[in-house]
Image: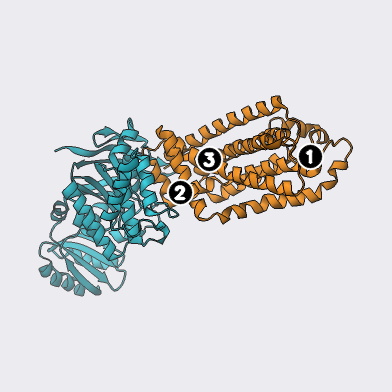
Amino acid sequence: METAIEARELRKSYPPAVTALDGVSLAVEAGTIFGLLGPNGAGKSTTVRVLSTLSRPDSGSARVAGIDVLASPVRVRHAIGVVGQKHGSDPEATGRENLVLQGEFYGITGRGLRRRVAESLERFGLGDAADRKVKTYSGGMQRRLDIAMGLLHRPRVLFLDEPTTGLDPEARADMWREIERLAAEELMTILITTHYMDEADRLASRLAIIDRGRVVVEGTPDQLKSDLNGDAIQIELADRDDAGAREALARVEEIAEVKLDGRTVRARAQDGAAAIPAVLGAFEVHGVKATSVTLARPSLDDVYLRYAGRAFSQAHTDPEEVAV
Amino acid sequence: MTPLRQSWQVAMRNIRVFMRNPAYLGMTLTQPIIWLLLFGALFKAVVRIPGFHGGSYIDFLTPGIIVMLAVSSAGWTGMGFIEDIHGGVMDRQLVSPVWRGALNAGTVAYAALMIVIQTVLIVLLALALGANYTGGIGGVLVLILVAALLGATFASLSNGVAVLARQREALIGAVTLVLLPLTFLSTALMQESLVPGWIRTVAKFNPVNWAVEAGRSAAMQRIDWGLVGSRIGFLAALTLVSAMFATRAFAKYQRSL
């Protein structure tokens, strides 16, 4: 199969002390949706900025749509669409004016441009709002306009940088349907970054988890989940009692991969339902009190925990992370 | 063709915003009107200083105020880029194949257009206050031209500073830092023969002074074609150089992303 996006050993640091990309390599097959998953500051957006020619890496190489990103950025720009995290539209202009200006930037002009803009407005449900200023649009409408602008010149590769952040659930579901349609019907290659596990799980045919500027694991969502051993058990302790809990859990044969994280214990078991009584029994013996026990089939959250060594929700709020 | 077309489209983006709210023009004119009235009243007696030749002070002052207006009005041009950077518009434009020069040229053209309109209004106001345009319509057109060229230079500089600094405060600082010294180190408010020698020397290299001299000579005095021609040439060259600086600033901005 043809490779639409290929990155090799991308490195980039921001002086004095931030390493945003620490050797990112990835390959995306043409016509598929690839998810780049990770917490804020992991390097997702920097990766997109480099692949979309906005920024240059310190070292490494990349090809997008078969074109060398560093050698021929202008040709790459014609071949790609980019929808950034922020709204890229001019709030003081109307939706139609935004789209027309966007088309002009790609060298599309005249009647062809006007027709394409009108079609695009209809397709994204902005026909009625076409001649209203964008600052009067709802968040979902602005996002649809962003996508319409990113697609106006019919790119072969689309970059979506956290496209659903800040959207309400309904607008989010709409966005998911649209993204799926683009890949299925228009055979577009889509690279989507997200910090929502469910989003990556639903949309991406392959995904990479990125943490601290490195790809820590890559595969299909199912592969990644089946790499994990059995069910996930999560126990909340009444006290921060690491030593006692650790000792207790060491005696339970049924469980593996025990991770203690403050008052939270995470572990894996082939048969979770059978392991829980054994765990609680061992806690009883060692005088460790648990306030809750939950059992779950493996999720991408667990995949993240396993490969990034931290719970996703914590990495996400880690104050040391630098939002890039 | 494409670069011109794209520059025009960028200018139109700004012009449309202005057309929807033309009252904005009135706001930008309050400052030069106050300067004209205040300086006009404050320095009225200047004409009685021995060695000050010819005309009323309003004749002398009007080109100076117009040039000040051009610098201050153009100085804020970069604010649009700072808004664009914070709103994500800039990055969207920069991942498109648009010619970078068009992003600058379009906003500079808009700034120059605003300065032309403002200059015409100040020229008319000064006329009502008794200014005497010896140079006639042709002279006034030269005054408008030099104001637009000077404004275009400062609009590009403002854009470049905005893209490099990306902060409103930095741009406000730069404009306030530059405006008064450049004005006072010129003959905008005082006749050349009456300013200290060192200011006269500095003024020779001050683009604000080039515009003042050329505009005043053309509109208010007997036109000195040598002076006017050379000053227009200097200003045109500076307009180009500053536009190149602003266009290159985008590459520098992208390297920092």
Residue A27: x and y, percent? Answer: 21, 40
Residue B190 is marked as 1
Letter of the chain in cyan: A
Q: Amino acid at mark 2?
A: Asp
Q: Secondary structure at mark 2?
A: helix
Q: Amino acid at mark 3?
A: Val
Q: Tell me which label, 3 or 1, sits earlier in the chain.
A: 3
Q: Residue at x 78, y 48 (%)?
A: B40
Residue receiving disc 3:
B108
Q: Is residue A258 above or below residue A153?
A: below
Residue receiving disc 2:
B84
Q: Residue at x 32, y 31 (%)?
A: A72
The reply to whether residue B257 is visible in this rendering is: yes
Front one among A125 and A36: A125
User: CA separation, marks 3 and 1?
Assistant: 30 Å
Q: Secondary structure at mark 3?
A: helix
Q: Are marks 3 and 2 on the same chain?
A: yes
Q: Residue at x 45, y 49 (%)?
A: B84
Q: The residue marked by circle 3 belongs to what chain?
A: B
Q: Colour of chain B?
A: orange
Front one among A10 and A190: A190
- B9 relative position to B111: left or right: left
Q: Are marks 3 and 1 on the same chain?
A: yes
Q: Secondary structure at mark 1?
A: loop
Q: Are marks 1 and 2 on the same chain?
A: yes
Q: Tell me which label, 3 or 2, sits earlier in the chain.
A: 2
